[in-house]
Amino acid sequence: MSDAPFDSAAARAQVLDRVAQAARASGRDPADVTLVAVSKQQPWDPVAQVLAAGQTIFGENRVQEAQTRWADRREGLELRLIGPLQTNKAREAVALFDVIETLDRERLAKALAEEMARQGRAVRLYVQVNTGEEPQKAGVSPAEADAFIARCREAHGLEIEGLMCIPPAEEPAGPHFALLGKIAARNGLSKLSMGMSGDYETAVRFGATSVRVGSALFGARAA
Ligand SMILES: *Cc1c(COP(=O)(O)O)cnc(C)c1O
């Protein structure tokens, strides 16, 4: 690998351009697709570069890491939790994040509802669907999704904004994105968080309203 610094501002411009092209090619308005910059495990410099370039929406997969990085420079930003959330971290997550994309079980729904009421804070919520039904992956199964969304709404009074998925790494992502869109449509949801560095253009063609891009913006994460 070369030691030349990765130009994150240029990478961001290129990703935005590709998102816009994919949107237009499928008859969509590029403004309807949000770029979530996944800053987890990245050094500060490249993150600072995209901030300076105007990026305001960031995704993190750990509550603690996100607090350390963002708590003191929170203003004007939108922070999204895209990693699994333990129930005992619900309080901190509700206090820090604007969006939690990984709601996937009833205990967590209950904990989030209680914390939002306690803190008087409405966090936007996405239900994570394990479209590939991978045992090691979080998310409700496609078959359970309708009932889970209904429980969130009816039993816990939660407003669900959309759905999120992470397709199996070794399969074409398109069918997974299509499935997520189908589950969203039949549950009256219009927001789809799907697509990462390797497949965000495909996701946009399948209707993604937000794409979560890390390494294509910042370079490979430190191992
Ligand atoms: C890390 C991560 C991403 C970003 O992955 P890249 O391939 O680096 O773009 C997106 N979504 C989730 C849930 C992640 O954990």
Image (cartoon, rainbow, N blue to C red):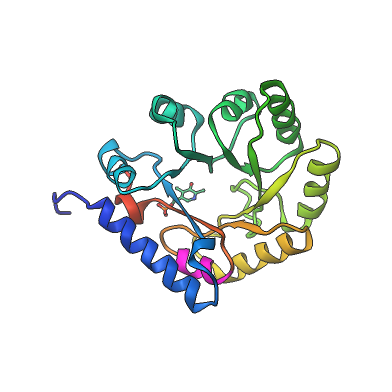
Residue 103, position as x, y percentages in the image: 66, 42
Magenta highlight range:
200-206
The C terminus sits in image quarter? top left
Q: Position of residue 45 (x, y in %)?
A: 25, 39
Q: Is residue 195 above or below residue 80?
A: below
Instruction: Name the residue: 17% across, 49% down.
Output: 5
Q: Estimate the x, y position of residue 163 in percent, counting from the top left.
A: 65, 53
Residue 2 percent across, percent down from the top left = 14, 53
Q: Residue furthest top?
A: 118
Residue closest to the far right: 154
Q: Is residue 171 visible?
A: no
- The residue depicted at 39 percent of the width and 61 percent of the height is 16
Residue at the extreme left: 3
Q: Is residue 40 left or right of residue 83?
A: left
Closest to the observer: 41 or 158? 158
| Quadrant the N terminus occupies | bottom left
- In this picture, residue 85 sits left or right of residue 43: right
203 to 127, vertically: above or below? below
